[in-house]
Each structure stands twice: as C-alpha cells, then as structure tokens.
Image (spheres, coloured by chain):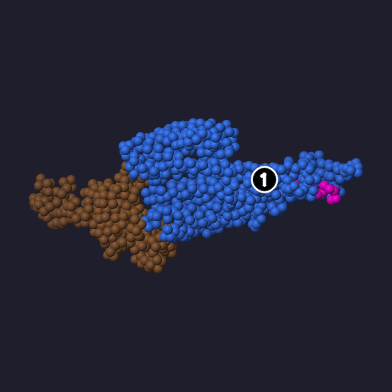
Chain colours: A blue, B brown
Amino acid sequence: MIDRLRRVLRVARWEVARAGGGVDRRTLAAALALLLVAGGVLGGGLAVGAVGLDVDRDVYRVAVDGDSPYADAVEEAPALTPVPVEGADLGDTADLVVFDGGGSRTDAVETVAVRASDTRKGEAAAAEFRAAVEAHNERLMAAEENATAAFPVTVTLRYVGRTSALDEGSTLGEDDGGSDDGSGGGTGGDAEGGDDGSGGGTGGDAEGDDGDTSETAPTGGDTATDGGGLAVPSVGGGTFGADTVGSPGSISPPFPFVSLLLAFVFLVPMNFLIQAYGSSVLDERTNRRGEPMLVTPLSPVDIVAGKTLPYVAAALVVTALIALGVGGGVLSVLAVLPVALTFLAATFVGAMFARSFKELTFVTVGVSVLLTTYAFVPAIFTNVTPVALVSPLTLVVFDLQGEAVSAGEALFSTVPMALGSALLFGLGLGVYREEDMFTQKPVPRKFLDALAVRLSPVEDVALAGLVDRGRLRALGSVAFLTACTIPFVFVAELLAVATLFALPVTVSVPVLLVTIAFVEEVAKSVGLYAGFERDVFARTDRVAVAVGVASAVGFFLAEKATAVAQAVGLTELYVGRAAFGSVAGGAGLSPVTAVALLFAPLLLHGFATTVAAVGASRDRTYYVLTLALATLVHAAYNFGVVSLHG
Amino acid sequence: MIEVAGLRKTYGDFAAVVDSDFSVEEGEVFGIVGPNGAGKTTTLKVLAGLVDPTEGDVEVAGFPSDDPEMRRRLGFLPEESPLYEEMTPLSYLNFFADLYDVPSEVADERIEAALDRLELDHRDRRLGDMSKGMKRKVAIARSLVNDPDVLVYDEPASGLDPVTTNSVLEFTRELRAAGKTVVFSAHNLYHVESVCDRVVVMNEGRIVARGSVDGIRERHGETTYHVFTDVAPAAGERLIEALADPDAPTEEVGDRFRTVVPDMDAVEAVRAAAAEAGGEVVDIRTREPSLEDVFLDIVGRPMPGRYTGGGGAVDETRDTAGDGGEGDDERNRPAEPPEGAE
C-alpha cells in the first residue's frame, strides 16, 4: 500500500512538473490576470450590494425644508436628492416640492402639500416620494421600543419549505441558525421576535446594512455569519425578504440569492481545472506519448491516480481558499469535493474517449455545462424543496447561510456524485491500456469498449452448464456492471425530478415515468449490448436470456439502495413518489401485497431486460427496437404502481 | 531468457499472431522480420507486457509477461517514440528512472553514460525542439535507465539518417557484448542481417521461417553463378535449360555478356555455348542470396523496404473489426518506406 502511494506520488510530482513546463509563463500570467479581473468584478458587485449602492441613485430632486419631518424620508431614499425649498423652481431645479404646513392646520393634524412637475418624471418622483415616506414610516415603527404599540396585531410567519426525515439526525453545520424546531433550518422568519414587547430586533434594512446578524432574528434569507472576509451580505434584503418585521406587503419568501451566487463561485475554478486535466490525459494518448509509461512497473491505476492527484489537490486548495473568502466552512469544502471529483472523472472519461483536442473541447464544455447545471439549478430551490438536496451545492448554500445540515442530508447530497465519480474513473481505467488508448474510434464505440472490458466471456452452453462456477462468475460480472450504473440512474432520475417538478402533475408524471423507464432500461441493457458487440457474449438466445436475467438481478439489488430517497423525504413530493414509489410508501399494504410489490420490480426488470438483451444479441437495429419495447413495458408498469400508490 | 509458446493474439475476427513459438537465449540478438501486418509489432508488445495474449504462454526473464517484476527487467522501444516535448532529455530520463525506483545517483550515472555513448548533446534543450534522430536517442536511453536484462526494440533505426542508423546498430551490438538480450524488428533487412544472431520471418501472423540468418539463407535461397563471356553464348536448347531464370537470358554488361545459372553443370553449358559462338568464358562469380531474396522467396512479395506505396499496409495493432471509424482510415494509410531502404 505504501509502495503504491509512493508510486502515485511520484507520478503526481512529475505531472506537476510537466504541467508547469507545458504552460507558458505569460499565458499563465494572463490567465491569472483574467481571474483577478473576474474576481474583482464579482467582488465589486458584491461590495456594491453590501453598501447599498443603487444604480437609480439621486434620480429625483425633491425640494423639502431641512426641519420638515419628510426631510429624513427624502434623505434616506437613494433615488431622491433633497434640495432647498427656497429658490426651488418646479420642473427646473426640482421635480417635486414638499410644502410643509402650507395648507390649513388644526391642533391635531399637520398638513402637507406636495406638488410635482407636470411631466412623467414628476409623476415618477411623486411615486418614489410616496414609497420613501412609507418605508421611512415602516422603519420608525420597527424601531419603536414598544412593539405592541407599533404593531398591535402581529402575525408569526414561518417558512417551512424543506422537510426531511433525516433532520433529526446529527448536524454538520456551524450552528443551528434558526432551525430550532428542526423543521428546516433558517426558513423560519419569525415576524414576532418575542412576546416581551421588545420587538424582533431591528430587522434587515431594506438597503442592507453591514450584514451583521447579531441583532436580527433568523430570516431564512441571506444572512451573514460573523467572520472575516467576504461575509455574505444582505443584499437587497427587502426584496428577498430579509426584513423580519414589517407590514405584510414588505415580506416575501426567502431566496438565498447571494449565498447561491457565492456557491456558484466554487464551480468556476473547476472549468479551468478540467481543461488542464483533460489536456494532460489526452496528451498521453496523442501520438502514443504515454506508451512507455505502460511498460513501467506502474499499473494503470497508479498512473491515473498520480496524474489526477495534483488536480484534486488543486481543487481542494482553491475550494478551501474560496470558502475562506466567502465565509464558508468545512462543510462547503466537503460538499464541493465530490463535485470536483465528478468534474475530473467525467473529463477523464471524455479524454479517454476523445479522438482529438477538438473533440476534447466539446467534451469539457459538455461536462462543464451538464455538471454546472446539475449542481446549480437544484440549489436554487434551497429552502423550498428537498429536491434541492440533489446537488451538493445546496449544502454550500446552507453552510453560507449558517444553517445546520444533518449527516443524512450531507450523505444524500454527496454520495451519489462521489460514487458516480469513482465509477467514471473505473470506466475510463478500463480503456487505459495499450489496446484501447491509442486507437481512434468514435466516442460511442470507445464507450462500448470500456463497458465490454469489464465483462467476462459467456459462452453458449446447455442449461446444466449454468451452475458452472466460471459461468456464474461471468454472469456475476454482468450483474455487477449493471449494479454500478445505479448512481448514474439515480442522478439522472433526480435530475428528471428536479427538472419536471415545477410542471403541472398531469404533464410531469407521465413524462417522468417514461423517462425513468427509458433511463433504467438503457442502464440495464447497454452493457449487454457492449458484450454482444465486442463478442464477449455468444450471440444466442440462451445467452441473451442468461445475461438479461443477471443484469436484472444486479439492477434490482442495487436499486434498493435508492431507498435512501424515502429516508430523505423526497417522496413527499408527488413526482418523487412517482420516481421512487416502488421503494417507498408501502405503508398500509398487506404483507402479501408488500412482498409482491417488493419483488414485482424483479420480474419487471427480468422480463424487460431479457427482451432488450435478445435484441442486443442480434444487431443494433434490433436492440433499439427491443429497448423501445422494454421501455414501454416498464413505463406501463410504472403507471400501474403510481396508480396503486395513488 | 524469453519463451513464447502457442502465442495467439486476435482482435475480433482478425488474428494478428497465430500459434507463434520461439525462444531467445540470454545475450542473443533476435530479429523478427516480415511485411507490414505480419504480426511483428504485436509480438513485441506481447513480450513487453503491453498487450495481453489471447492464448499462449509468454515468459520473459523468468516472469510472465503481465508480471510487474518482468517489467522491471525489460526495456522497450516502440516503433514511434513521441516524448513529453515540454521536458528536457535529463528531466525526461530522470522521470522514468524515478518510475523504476532507480536511486537518483545511480540514475544520473546511467543517464550520463547512455547519453555520452549515444552522443546526445543539448541535454537541457526541450525535447520538442529536438530532431527526430536526437529524440530517438533519448528514447533508446530511456529503455536503459532501469538497466534491463531484456531489450525489446521495434524498428530502432526507423527514420534515422545513415550515420545515426549505424550508430544505433553498433550500439545494439555493444548491448549484446554487455550480455543483454535484445529482440528487435526492422523493415530494413540489412539491419537485421548485420546484428541478429537468429531471426524469425513472420507472414500474416505466422512464423514462416526461423533460424540463423545463414541457415535460413541456405534453406530458402540458392547460390547462383554469374558467368561472364566475351561473346553472347549461342542460344541453344542446352543453354536455355541451364539458365537459373529462363525469363532472364544472357544480358550485355559493358563489353561482356553475363549469364546467370544455378550450378556448375550449367556453367559448363554456358562455356560450351560461348565456344560455339566463337568466344570464351572470361569470369565466373558466385553470388550468395541476400535476406531480401530469402524474404521474397518465403513470403512471395517484396520486402517492406522496397514497398513503393499504395494501400494495404496494415498496422496489426490497430482495430481491424471494420468499425468504419477513423481507425480504418489510419489502418489503410500507405506505409512509408523507411529511410535508408534501397
């Protein structure tokens, strides 16, 4: 083990030296400068948000006396600029004039006259002035010591969007910000801070102050944690519901805009890393450069691990630095690690399959777009739906919000990607050998090669020969290969759920059921097709049935792992039930029905996969046709299950 | 030192090597010759552990070819040797020495010695800026950094200028003198003839001849006699019967006439025919068959060095299942005649 580690480190050291030697210093300097500029723009943008700068600042001139009670309102509104009443010329030096006490007056009521210029700008100035006065009043009320007097009627508003069966487990977050009832951290915006009449603190200022949460109740929106660096500011708090106290009209559901933006920053360096990594892997294949390495005592695993290690290390360092900068913690780093590994693993496979740097470019762009979408889009729904936990980036958002995350949630978010990356590396390693590395084949054929290399030959024998140990081992390799597709199937199905859950149920459920049937049928049969295409399996019906059943068993057993979906509460969504219903929601059924339902998928998989396997044993056209048939059968079964579950 | 028994390597339906058996003694230089697609490179790659045999046993230096320990005792030089162009010769060779666990001081010594012997200067220049010959020398030096017992060289002098080629061949002889076992293939049969103790001739994946170069020549080639006369011999029936090649009768060479015949009886027939025409035999020379002649005799087509282009050159290591991809294009690429070929 130590020897292997030493070998891996040796390759890693040389990979660093090579990578360093392969990049021109000026190019490197230019890339760093670009990064700095991009970072500067992003930081500047955040800083602008943090200090409350607005693009519509000082748009309207309002003539108001300095001792007028409206002067403060005008002063505080960014869009309004106060000018002296004396000498103000409406339409020229002022868009609006406030005549304080200019009208009739009684002892109890002060009057104010507001006159705007008879232009569209004047109308806009009047509207802005009205909004400024209302906001000013809101702030005065919020600052009132006697909260009961300020808000005689209080309504407690609590956002409870994220529910999870794993919430009661141990938590990994820095603190339990606002999730004191275990109902979903941080989403509870308690409009009434307490019952002592002291109010709920100051609330987030509409323009955002310093982002300090020490005086604010949990908001569910972006809140900053104390700590150095670019702490998460409460940008646009009013818009995104950072106010904890106010009139109902000023409260909106939480949206972790800035946390999401900062979480996205974690993904940016991945794009640079995969470019460098993909080039390095493909460089080994170009003109057989890597052939001499294959003759050394190093195994392909040693070589690939050594070549990959520097990029994983770089991803870790960059992630840690970003986390340090934006106020993330260890959770952020741990959450981003499987994302980085998946980026690298997918790039590795792509670089092993690509025939040229041009193809590699398409691969890396594809990887970047797909994985960024997969990581980023679900995270938008953080605090809203458990679907968001599909993405490890959601954990980062939680971490930046200072919210707690249970161990189960963390595993749910990260394990599929981590497993997927390991399997992708395994897939690529299958063709990291002389016979495959240097051949020029289209990507799909390379993919089939990579699958076929993991299969053991299955010859046609009489039924009695089935019990032969070697044959069972060969069928075991089929089952194992299919079982290995489960993380990808899981990820694809979660992605489908995340994509479709916003659509009407009448549309999303049928589409989802067919999609899932297709994904699963492909997962079960593509390895079989590879086996027949590469002559690993004898092309007979008997062998097709044998490998079809083996594949179905492997899939069935591995599919049970998706029971974690039930644990995390995903099946509380209708589409979640549709996607994972077969392993969830068995409550209320009789034991016989429950057992029948438990094994019904095995029968389904056995039948459908055998149909596709028989087609695969013929040729590609038959395979496509039988795959379509298997998908239809599977989809019909899914409809039945969903109907049964209601 | 090397034992190959029942070696068979197939790619789909294509058999690159079929039922190949041979052994190589310690300290021997063993040649593998054959036309393109004969299975030479595949055989060498199996020996190097790069390609797994479909059937058969291969043992190198006492270890199976897939044993990492075998790889420690083997140096391999592929036909093409693109290097990491951003590295210098010294850093590149140190890298490989490192991979073989060679202590740095020992590695430095070996690398210096190899580069000195191969007369490679500019050791700090980027490999990407070096000529093909210099790169080849670096690749040869790489095959020696682990001080291997067995060297497997695929076309070691391919694409090199005559001076460098001679240097490489001389270096191969020195390796034999140093007790190394060398297996190598070459397109240029002169190279094989000049350094190999024994050879096998491969054709369409099979070994079709084997033994010492002289032995093969004896078996597959015939000594001919070139009889020079001062007049054209009378074209009688006896003379025509005596000719080594009836389609190639007497030809005029300068002021003399040359008739090629297979044995001494035929020489007498030429002498009689010349006398009949009023002349006499002025010179008789014997000519031993070259390996090229033997090759032609065995495989029935010209040796690769005389290949003049066109399709059909097959790299047996490539996929031949007829995928229709780019690999097929490359597979059908016309072979380039090696430098120095006649």
Q: Residue at x 37, y 56 (%)?
A: A295
Chain under disc 1: A
Residue sitting at the far front: A591
Q: Is residue A49 above or below residue B164?
A: above
Instruction: Give the image location of residue B4, x and y in percent.
Output: 27, 53
Q: Is residue A158 above or below residue A618?
A: below
Q: Is residue A326 above or below residue A441?
A: below
In which image quadrant can residue B215 be found? bottom left
Residue B49 showing in the rendered view: no
Which SS class for mark 1?
loop
The one of A281 and A482 positioned closer to us in this rendering: A482
Asked if residue A337 is among those painted magenta in the image, a careful observer would answer: no
Left or right of residue A78: residue A436: left
Name the image quarter holding the C terminus of chain B.
bottom left
In which image quadrant can residue A102 be found? top right
Instruction: Give the image location of residue B96, x and y in percent.
Output: 40, 60
The one of A62 and A339 positioned closer to us in this rendering: A339
Disc 1 marks a residue whose amino acid type is Gly
The residue labelled by disc 1 is A188
Q: Residue at x 80, y 49 (%)?
A: A72
Q: Residue at x 67, y 50 (%)?
A: A223
Q: Main secondary structure of the magenta part?
A: loop
Q: Residues within 10 Å of mark 1 (few under 14, many from 20)?
A: many
Magenta region = A65-79
Residue A176 showing in the rendered view: yes
The one of A277 and A502 positioned closer to us in this rendering: A502
Instruction: Give the image location of residue A11, x and y in percent.
Output: 44, 58
Q: Residue at x 82, y 47 (%)?
A: A70
